[in-house]
Image: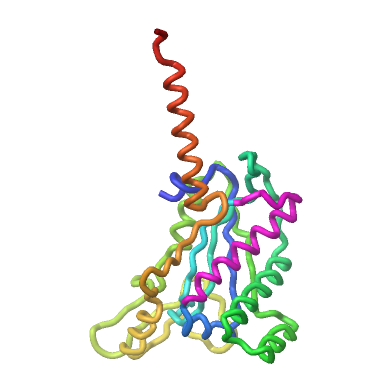
C-alpha cells in the first residue's frame, strides 16, 4: 500500500539512525522524546540534502518508523526510514542526489539528539560534555541500502521491514512451562562476548520485555515528512482533482 499510495517512482534508500546506550534510558522513561527522535532524523536528512543541491526549499520524501526493540527484545530506540534519493522543488521538479555522507549525518544527528534531551531538561551539562568527548560518538547513521525507481516491489519489502513488530513469534518458542527461548536474528554478528544463538528468559521477564514496547496512547511511531507528509500529499491530490475537473468542463459540449 505504501508503494502505491505514498512513494513516488524514484530511487529510495533505507536510513538507520542509532544512538549510544547511555542515552537510551531517557527515551524509555520519557516516551514523549520518541517523536523528537524521528524529527531529528528528518531534520538531518533535510539539511544535508538541501545543502547538497543549494536549495533550502527543496523537499525529499521520508517515511520514518521509531523502532524500540533490539535483537533480543531489549530496549533499543532507533529510527528506520525510507527516504527518496533526491527531492522536489517548490515547483514540483525532481532533483536526484547521488550521495549523502554518512559521517556528516552521524555528527548532525548526534547534535540534534543531544539538544533534544537537553531542552527537555533531562541531561546535565557534565553528561553532555562526556558524550561529546568520546572519540567514537556512539551514534551511527547508515544509508547504503538502496532501491531503483523501477523496483517498486523492493520498496514495499523495505517498508514492511521497517514497520516490523518488536517481537518475532517465529524466533520464540515456549512449551508452556520453563524458560522462553528466543533466537537471535539470522546473520547476527557476535560481539565476541560468548553470545549464544538462542537466549533463555524467565516467562515473566520476557513478558516485561514485550510490554515495554507497547506505545503510549496516541503515540505515532510512523511519521511522514517532506514530500510524503500528509499535508503535501493532500495538496497534490486536491490540485489533481481540480485539474481533472477543469479538463472535464473544458471538454464539455459546446452550447
Residue 135: x, y in percent?
A: 75, 83
> Any magenta on residue 14?
no
Q: Is residue 229 above or below residue 236?
A: below
Q: Quadrant of residue 117?
A: bottom right
Q: Main secondary structure of the magenta part?
A: helix
* Residue 185 drawn at (x, y percent): 47, 73
> Quadrant of the rendered structure where residue 115 is?
bottom right
User: How many numbered badges does the structure rendering display?
Assistant: 0
Taking the spot 62% from the left edge, 50% from the top edge, the residue there is 59
Q: Which residues are magenta?
A: 32-60
Report the side of 174 relative to 102 (left or right).
Answer: left
Q: Is residue 216 left or right of residue 154?
A: left
| Front position in the image: 139 or 147 | 139
In the image, is residue 17 above or below residue 45?
below
Query: Which is nearer the eye, 221 or 33?
Result: 33
56 drawn magenta: yes
Residue 94 placement, left or right of 154: right
Location of residue 245 (image quadrant): top left
Most distant residue in the front direction: 255
- Which residue is depicted at the point 41% across and 72% down? 166
**Residue furthest out toward the left:** 176
- Residue 180 x %, y %: 33, 85
Q: Residue at x 42, y 85 (%)?
A: 199
Compared with 180, 158 (above or below) is: above
Amino acid at each position: 500500500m505504501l508503494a502505491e499510495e505514498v512513494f513516488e517512482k524514484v530511487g529510495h534508500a533505507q536510513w538507520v539512525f542509532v544512538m549510544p546506550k547511555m542515552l537510551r534510558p531517557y527515551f524509555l522513561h520519557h516516551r514523549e522524546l520518541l517523536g523528537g527522535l524521528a524529527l531529528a532524523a528528518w531534520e538531518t536528512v533535510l539539511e544535508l540534502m538541501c545543502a547538497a543541491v543549494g536549495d533550502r526549499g527543496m523537499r525529499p520524501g521520508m517515511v520514518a518508523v521509531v523502532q524500540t526493540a533490539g535483537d533480543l527484545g531489549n530496549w533499543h530506540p532507533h529510527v528506520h526510514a525510507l527516504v527518496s534519493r533526491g527531492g522536489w522543488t517548490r515547483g514540483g521538479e525532481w532533483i536526484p542526489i547521488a550521495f549523502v555522507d554518512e559521517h556528516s549525518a552521524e555528527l548532525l544527528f548526534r547534535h540534534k539528539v543531544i539538544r533534544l534531551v537537553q531542552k527537555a531538561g533531562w541531561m546535565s551539562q557534565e553528561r553532555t560534555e562526556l558524550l561529546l568527548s568520546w572519540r567514537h560518538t556512539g551514534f551511527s547513521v547508515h544509508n547504503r541500502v538502496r532501491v531503483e525507481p523501477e523496483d517498486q516491489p523492493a520498496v514495499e519489502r523495505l517498508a514492511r521491514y521497517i514497520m516490523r513488530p518488536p517481537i518475532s513469534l517465529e524466533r520464540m518458542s515456549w512449551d508452556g512451562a520453563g524458560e522462553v527461548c528466543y533466537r537471535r536474528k539470522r546473520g547476527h554478528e557476535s560481539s565476541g562476548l560468548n553470545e549464544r544463538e538462542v537466549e533463555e528468559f524467565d516467562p515473566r521477564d520476557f513478558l516485561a520485555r514485550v510490554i515495554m514496547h507497547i506505545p503510549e496512547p496516541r503515540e505515532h511511531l510512523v511519521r511522514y515528512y517532506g514530500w510524503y507528509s500528509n499535508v503535501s500529499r493532500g495538496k497534490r491530490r486536491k490540485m489533481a482533482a481540480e485539474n481533472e475537473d477543469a479538463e472535464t468542463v473544458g471538454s464539455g459540449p459546446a452550447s
